[in-house]
Amino acid sequence: MSSPASQLELARRTRRKIAARILPFVFLLYLIAFIDRMNIGAAALQMPHDLGFSDRVIGLGAGIFFLGYFLLEIPGALIVERWSARGWIARIMISWGVVTVLLAFIQTARQFYLMRFLVGAAEAGFFPGIIVYLTHWFRYSDRAKAVAVFYAANPLSYVVASPLASWLLGISWIGLRGWRWLFIFEGIPAVLFGILTLFLLTDWPRQARWLAPAERSWINEELENEKRTKEQKRSYTIGQALRQPDVLLLALCYFCAQTGGYGLSFWLPTILKRLSGKSDARVMLLASLPYIAGFLTQQLNGWHSDRHRERRWHTAIPLMACGTVLSLAVASSARPAASLTAFTLAGACFYAFQPCFWAVPTRFLSQSAAAASIGMINSVGNLGGFVGPAVMGYLAARTHSFHAGLLYLVGSLILSGALMLAVGASHRKALPRHP
């Protein structure tokens, strides 16, 4: 029988191997996904002039992405759980990369709406699929840190994309303006990495030849014990899980949060452009500051949440703080430097909530019930990605100012934090600590 010390070393070695093998690659996949999802914000600096699009058209086209995304979220998450994460994620990436390239050749508003819808439909299932996939490899006590590493691609995508977009917006080759090259150059990596996914991802620990037999046994046993503990409390069918009050609250919470987050991120380059009057290249660099701050707070909050085995307050406080700080950006709009500082702090607060939030549904649900619930939470929540940019565009067109739209986002973010505090009334006992 092995000693406690040898078991502790086995646990540490296995966790390190899994993290080193899986997290860097899924980080890169999500980085590419978010660059492709958000490049419309940079393209909007040139598209309206070239194609005659109004703020309302840009806002609606940005948001239509999430209507296509909404339709296939739950099936996509279940496919990852029941079939193959590797095969489904590869399919997603290749198809969305192709459609992103085709966006470069649109000429009309209807074509714009159609292609944005198809990009969303192509990408549907990617994010919840990765969250489900991480539950195949990481215990609950390690999950917020793992999600934080994966989710770091979200804010860092802006840091990477901003200088790239600055360069691409400044070129004009073979009669194509920079925004068209933006879609071409940022769509191709998705296709290439989709192919790589088939060779580099492993669906389950039992299939991992890169783990020693003892390491495979350890992680399988840990995850099975965790699943049995949940099932002893209550085993939910998919239908029961989707009707759980906490699942519904989480979906509403995420909807309000994404309304605020996407409403700001899609429009931030345009807001900064009008506030500062600086060049497109300088604006894109300034727009990256909130995401650099968000990356730092995201990692810190995920680590702190795992350390204290607490999720609810680690989610709610950043959301409420984000709304509060964003209101200061509105109040200081006459002072560009103060507004940029407030937007940066808002980004720091917003990205801190996400790793802790996604550890919540997998605490009391497992297998297909968890996969379906994560898919539903993400699909309903990401409808906020339609509402936020569309409402911002509509109010900007009506009022000729971003103030009303930003105040709408403030209310959404604060409401999101309040909803999070209502989650988990019957699930607030901390899980036992693991090595």
Image (cartoon, rainbow, N blue to C red):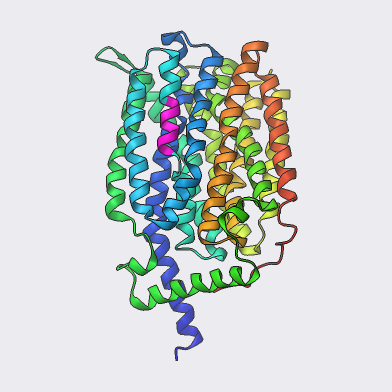
Q: Is residue 2 above or below residue 327?
A: below
Query: What stretch of residues is rendered in magenta?
Result: 116-123
Type of secondary structure dominating the magenta stretch: helix
The image quarter containing residue 191 is top left
Q: Residue 319, percent across and down? A: 68, 42
Q: Nearer the viewer, residue 185 or 372?
A: 372
Q: Is residue 424 visible?
A: yes
Q: How many numbered badges does the structure rendering display?
A: 0
Q: Residue 17, percent across and down? A: 39, 66
The image quarter containing residue 50 is top left
Q: Nearer the viewer, residue 129 or 36?
A: 129
Residue at image location 49% in from the left, 43% down from the top:
73
Q: Is residue 245 above or below residue 204?
A: above
Q: Quadrant of the N terminus?
A: bottom left
Q: Residue 64, percent across and down? A: 51, 26
Task: Give the residue furthest to the bottom.
Answer: 1
Q: Quadrant of the C terminus?
A: bottom right
The question of residue 157 being in magenta is answered with no
Residue at image location 43% in from the left, 77% down from the top:
10
The question of residue 120 being in magenta is answered with yes
Q: Nearer the viewer, residue 122 or 413?
A: 122
Q: Residue 123, percent across and down? A: 42, 38
The image quarter containing residue 14 is bottom left
Relative side of 287 to 334, left or right: left
Q: Is residue 400 visible?
A: no
Residue at image location 73% in from the left, 61% down from the top:
426
